[in-house]
Amino acid sequence: MMEQSNIKNKKKFHQRLLDLQLAIYELDEYLETVWQCKEKKLASFWKKIYKVLDYFPVKNKKKICADIHLYQKRELDMRRMKYPMKTSFNKIYRIKSCDVKLMRKLIYLADPKLNKWVKESCWNNFDLITEVNDDVEDIFEDMEIYNCNRFLIGMVINGKKKTFKEYKAFIDEIGDRNKNKLDKAKRNKAKSLVLNWTAEQAKATKKLLKSQMKKI
């Protein structure tokens, strides 16, 4: 998206995105390694995130970071034995892709004309499937840290068979939604590119799911 944009001084803009991602990673690392999180410490991470956001044309910082706040709440809820078992997969993985969506949102805000090339919403299914892939890939790694990995928690609470069926069904759901969009977007090369990437990710994630099930 940066390459296709008309953003001035791309190198500087890109560095600011990296600074923001690093600030978010620091918050994430704290949530992953400390069980009894302190409000004062959490506030210090948010202060840094908001400070980096000063470089971008953002009117309401809290609003644009709403999903990151929800992600933090989901992680903290885990400490209270509150797990996202009744939350829809679409919502869970939309929240999990919060940092990726924020980076992309800032690029689109800096160059609104990008929406004419490929709409921001075109990335929704891509974000969902890549985050599902992340949970499935990281199941063993996340056993060693504090991470609200829905796939791992599903294994513990619902068992292997049910969790496999749930995830296979969700991957198929994303694939079907994506296919319907792809069938309608054949004349739009940019949109088709994103949708084809999504299809590839869905196929790879289903293969990974089957592979991981044999190891679990």
Image (spheres, rainbow, N blue to C red):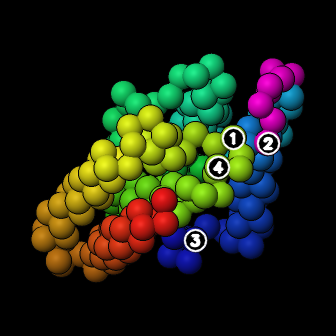
Q: Position of residue 179 (x, y in %)?
A: 18, 67
Which type of secondary structure does the marked residue at label 1 adopt? loop
Question: Mark 2 vs mark 4: which is more N-terminal?
Answer: 2
**Residue 50 appears in the rendering:** no
- Could you tell me how far apart the alpha carbons at marks 4 and 1 are, in whole angstroms? 8 Å
> Which class describes the residues within 10 Å of circle 1: few (<14), some (14-19), or many (20+)?
some
Q: Position of residue 106 (x, y in %)?
A: 59, 52
User: In this image, 24 relative to 198: left or right?
Assistant: right
Residue shown at 39% from the left, 43% from the top: 159
SS of the residue under disc 2 = helix
For marks 3 and 2, the one nearer the N-term is 3
Residue name at image x 60 percent, y 28 percent? 78
The image quarter in which residue 100 lies:
bottom right
| Pointers 4 and 1 in contact (C-beta within 8 Å) | no
Q: CA distance from mark 1 to mark 2?
A: 6 Å
Question: N-terminal of the two: label 4 or label 3?
Answer: 3
For mark 1, what is the residue? Answer: 146
Residue with the mark numbered 4: 143
Question: What percent of the width, then of the height, locates residue 55?
Answer: 75, 49
Which callout, 1 or 3, points at the residue further toward the start of the chain? 3
Name the residue that disc number 2 marks: 33
Magenta-colored span: 33-40
Residue position marked by numbered label 3 in the rendering: 2
The disc labelled 4 sits on which kind of residue?
Answer: Met
Query: Circles 1 and 3: CB distance less than 8 Å?
Result: no
Residue 190, image x, y percentages: 33, 76
| Magenta residues, dominant SS class | loop
Q: Residue at x 38, y 49 (%)?
A: 160
Secondary element under disc 4, as helix, strand or loop, is helix
Q: Residues within 10 Å of mark 4 (few under 14, many from 20)?
A: few
Please name which of the two marks, 4 or 3, marks the residue nearer to the observer. Answer: 4
